[in-house]
Image (tube, helix red, strand yellow):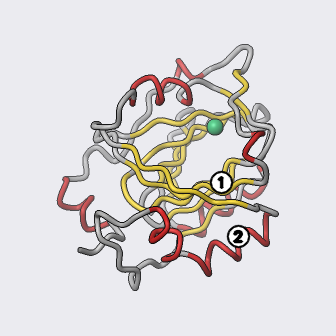
């Protein structure tokens, strides 16, 4: 389940309803899918992962006009992981929506709406978010540096970071649920052996 925080005010939101309501004025939609019936092994292929969520993904494609989907898995063993993370941990925009569904692991989006204080959305298994085209944001993994996400695209050629002038990301620490034990994180996983 996601958690939304506003560093400037200390406000924290942890229910799907609160998070959705907070994000709506910014054109961002958030959802949490009940994945209790999903069965995927740790060695599931991208095709198997996409198939497991096919009906939900089809709904999102129709809603947002997304035409393709893929699966990205990152762990500390991923070659070049630090360079990859550095590419997206600086404030940037895209010319199309950034849509992410977390299958396992965690990550944290910071959003800079410019008309309101920066806020952070920590994403966990079952969480879906859409960061609209042109929205200033950046993304970090949590301490375990592990995530598996499904990405949806309107046009993959548009998904290139455009770095912001006067970027503010250096003023914010990516804070995840690092107080949560590894056992609790495991219980949050939708992946059942
Ligand atoms: Fe991005």
Residue labelled 1 has its Cβ within 8 Å of some atom of ligand 1: no
- Give the image quadrant in which the ligand numbered 1 is located: top right
Q: Quadrant of residue 57?
A: bottom right
On the image, numbered disc 2 is attached to which residue? 60
Q: Is mark 2 within 8 Å of ligand 1?
A: no
Q: Nearer the viewer, residue 148 or 122?
A: 148
Residue at image position (51%, 66%) is: 15
- Disc marking residue 99: 1
Is 16 positioned to the left or the right of 91 in the image?
left
How many marks the image carries: the answer is 2
Could you classify mark 2 by the number of other residues whose Cα lies within 10 Å: few (under 14), some (14-19), or many (20 or more)? some
Q: Nearer the viewer, residue 11 or 96?
A: 96
Front in this rendered view, residue 112 or 36 = 36
Question: Mark 2 or mark 1, which is nearer the start of the sequence?
Answer: 2
Task: Tell whether label 2 touches label 1 (CB within 8 Å).
Answer: yes
Q: Position of residue 70 (x, y in %)?
A: 58, 57
Where 53 sits versus 125, above or below? below
Residue located 51% across and 56% down the image: 71
Q: Quadrant of the N terminus?
A: bottom left
Residue, x 57% and y 37% (percent of image)?
Answer: 110
Query: Residue 86 appears at what percent x and percent y?
Result: 49, 24
Is 36 located above or below residue 50 in the figure? below
| Residue 89 left/right relative to 60 | left
Q: CA distance from mark 1 to mark 2?
A: 9 Å
* Residue at the image point whose x is 68% and y is 62% from the top: 21
Circle 1 SS class: strand
Q: Is residue 35 left or right of residue 40?
A: right
Is 90 displayed left or right of 117 in the figure? Answer: left
Give x and y (percent) for residue 35: 44, 77
Q: Position of residue 184 (x, y in %)?
A: 23, 61
């Amino acid at each position: 389940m996601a958690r939304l925080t506003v560093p400037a005010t200390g406000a924290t939101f942890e229910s799907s309803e609160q998070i959705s309501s907070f994000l709506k004025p910014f054109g961002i939609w958030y959802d949490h899918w009940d994945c209790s019936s999903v069965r995927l092994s740790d060695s599931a292929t991208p095709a198997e992962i996409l198939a497991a969520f096919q009906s939900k993904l089809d709904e999102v494609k129709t809603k947002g006009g997304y035409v393709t989907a893929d699966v990205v898995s990152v762990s500390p063993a991923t070659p070049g992981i630090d360079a990859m993370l550095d590419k997206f941990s600086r404030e940037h925009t895209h010319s199309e929506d950034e849509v992410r569904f977390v299958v396992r692991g965690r990550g944290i989006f910071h959003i800079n709406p410019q008309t309101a204080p920066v806020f952070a959305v920590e994403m966990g298994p079952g969480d879906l978010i859409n960061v609209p085209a042109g929205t200033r944001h950046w993304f970090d993994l949590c301490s375990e540096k592990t995530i598996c996400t499904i990405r949806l695209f309107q046009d993959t050629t548009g998904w290139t970071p455009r770095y912001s002038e006067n970027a503010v990301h250096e003023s914010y620490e990516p804070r995840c649920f690092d107080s949560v034990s590894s056992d609790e994180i495991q219980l949050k996983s939708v992946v059942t052996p």
